[in-house]
Image (tube, rainbow, N blue to C red):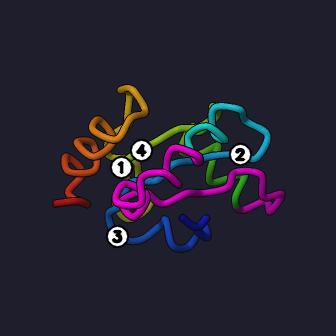
Amino acid sequence: MTTTSLSSIQSGTKVVAFVTDSCTYCKQFKEMLKKEPSLSSKITLFDCTSPAPETQTYLTKLGINSYPTIVCMSNGSITNTFSGQRNKQELTDFAKSCGTAS
C-alpha cells in the first residue's frame, strides 16, 4: 500500500482514496487495507495534506473536502463516488464497477 503522486492519478482508470494522516477514519481505512492485500492492490491512496498549490487547486476542482473520499477516476476526472460500507466486499465490487478489478 503506497501513496501516489498527483500526476499518477490524472491518467488511466483507477480507484483512488483521498486520505489525510490526521483523519481517524482514514487511519482505520488504511489499517483495513493492510489486512487485505488483495484489496489494497486495487486502491490507490492519495495524501491530501500536501501543501503544494497545484494539489490543493486540484482537490478543490474535484470537490474533495471530506476524508476518506473514495472515487473511480478516469484520466483525472471522477466518474463515480463510493458510498457503501468500507469493507472488502463492497470496495471490491466498486473496483469491479470501475473496470479496475477482475
Task: Name the residue carrying label 1.
Answer: 72
Tag 1: Cα neighbours inside 10 Å, few (<14), some, or many (≥20)? many
Q: Position of residue 16 (x, y in %)?
A: 46, 53
The kind of residue on which mark 4 rests is Val
Q: With respect to residue 100, does 17 lie above or below?
A: above
Q: CA distance from mark 3 to mark 2?
A: 23 Å
User: Which one is earlier in the sequence, the residue at label 3 or at label 2?
Assistant: 3
Q: Mark 3 vs mark 2: give the one in front.
A: 2
Q: CA distance from mark 4 to mark 1?
A: 4 Å
Q: Residue furthest right?
A: 51
The kind of residue on which mark 3 rests is Gly
Task: Name the residue carrying label 2.
Answer: 20
Residues shaded magenta: 30-54
Q: With respect to residue 100, does 63 lie above or below?
A: above
Task: Name the residue carrying label 3.
Answer: 12
Mark 3 element type = loop
Between residue 22 and residue 59, name the one nearer to us: 22
Q: Tell me if label 3 and label 4 are in contact, CB under 8 Å.
A: no
User: Which one is earlier in the sequence, the residue at label 2 or at label 1?
Assistant: 2
Q: Residue furthest left?
A: 102
The kind of residue on which mark 1 rests is Cys
Mark 2 element type = loop
Q: Position of residue 40 (x, y in %)?
A: 43, 58
Q: Residue at 73% x, 35% y: name it.
A: 23
- Of the 4 image quadrants, the one containing the N terminus is bottom right
User: Which one is earlier in the sequence, the residue at label 2 or at label 4?
Assistant: 2
